[in-house]
């Protein structure tokens, strides 16, 4: 069983930056894919960014050029560097991991962009 724990969320002003961390534990295998999703109130969950052990990286259209996903392929750790944050980035950000057809999720961390 894999446990994913996020940290780094908080309140930031528009134009600011935040770095989210996702630390995976409880397994001896490396997650094939790790990524970040977000869900704002009244909206569907959407992909923010994902990265695979094979090097594939995907970004949601809304964050391209502003967010960067980083992953240490030696273990189950992933990071999301967010820059030039906008009020519409306000959401709960959740870490996702995939292995052997299963999805694992963290509990989520709140990111609020407001002046």
Image (cartoon, rainbow, N blue to C red):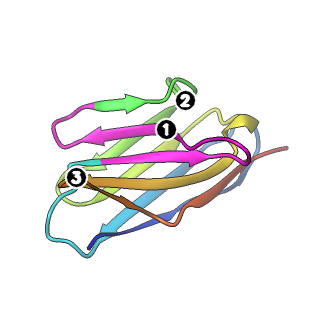
Q: Residue at image x 64%, y 32%?
A: 84
Q: Is residue 15 visible?
A: no
Pinpoint residue 20: horizontal percent, then vertical percent.
Answer: 50, 54
* Between marks 2 and 3 in the image, the one whose residue lies nearer the viewer: 3
The span picked out in magenta is: 34-56
The quadrant in which the C terminus is found is top right
Image coords of residue 29 (percent x, y): 14, 64
Image quadrant where residue 105 sits: bottom left
User: Taking 78 as reference, is 86 left or right?
Assistant: right
Question: Which residue is at 30% across, 40% downward?
Answer: 51
Q: Residues within 10 Å of mark 1 (few under 14, many from 20)?
A: many
Furthest-right residue in view? 115
Q: Is residue 81 above or below residue 24?
A: above
Q: Alpha carbon of mark 2 to alpha carbon of mark 3: how far?
A: 27 Å
Residue 39 appears in the rendering: yes
N-term mark: 2 or 3: 2
Q: Which residue is mark 1?
A: 48
Does the CB distance between marks 3 and 1 fall below 8 Å? no
Which label was assigned to residue 113?
none
Q: Badges 2 and 1: C-beta atoms under 8 Å apart?
A: yes
The residue under label 2 is 63
Q: Is residue 85 left or right of residue 96?
A: right
Q: Is residue 20 above or below residue 29?
A: above
As rendered, which of 30 and 66 lies closer to the eye?
30
Q: Is residue 29 magenta?
A: no
Residue at (17, 56) in percent of width and height:
74
Percent of width and height locating residue 81: 49, 43
Residue positioned 44% across, 36% down in the render: 68
Q: Which mark is residue 101?
A: 3
Considering only order in the chain, which callout, 1 or 3, is on the residue closer to the N terminus? 1
Q: Is residue 77 above or below residue 43?
A: below
């Amino acid at each position: 069983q894999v446990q994913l724990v996020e940290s780094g969320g908080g309140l930031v002003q528009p134009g600011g930056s935040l770095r989210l961390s996702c630390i995976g534990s409880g397994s001896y295998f490396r997650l094939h894919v790790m990524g970040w999703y977000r869900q704002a109130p009244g909206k569907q969950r959407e992909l923010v960014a994902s990265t695979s052990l094979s090097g594939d990286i995907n970004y949601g259209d809304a964050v391209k050029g502003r967010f960067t996903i980083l992953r240490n392929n030696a273990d189950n750790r992933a990071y999301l560097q967010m820059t030039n944050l906008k009020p519409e980035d306000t959401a709960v950000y959740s870490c996702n991991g995939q292995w052997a057809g299963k999805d694992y999720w963290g509990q989520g961390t709140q990111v609020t962009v407001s002046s």
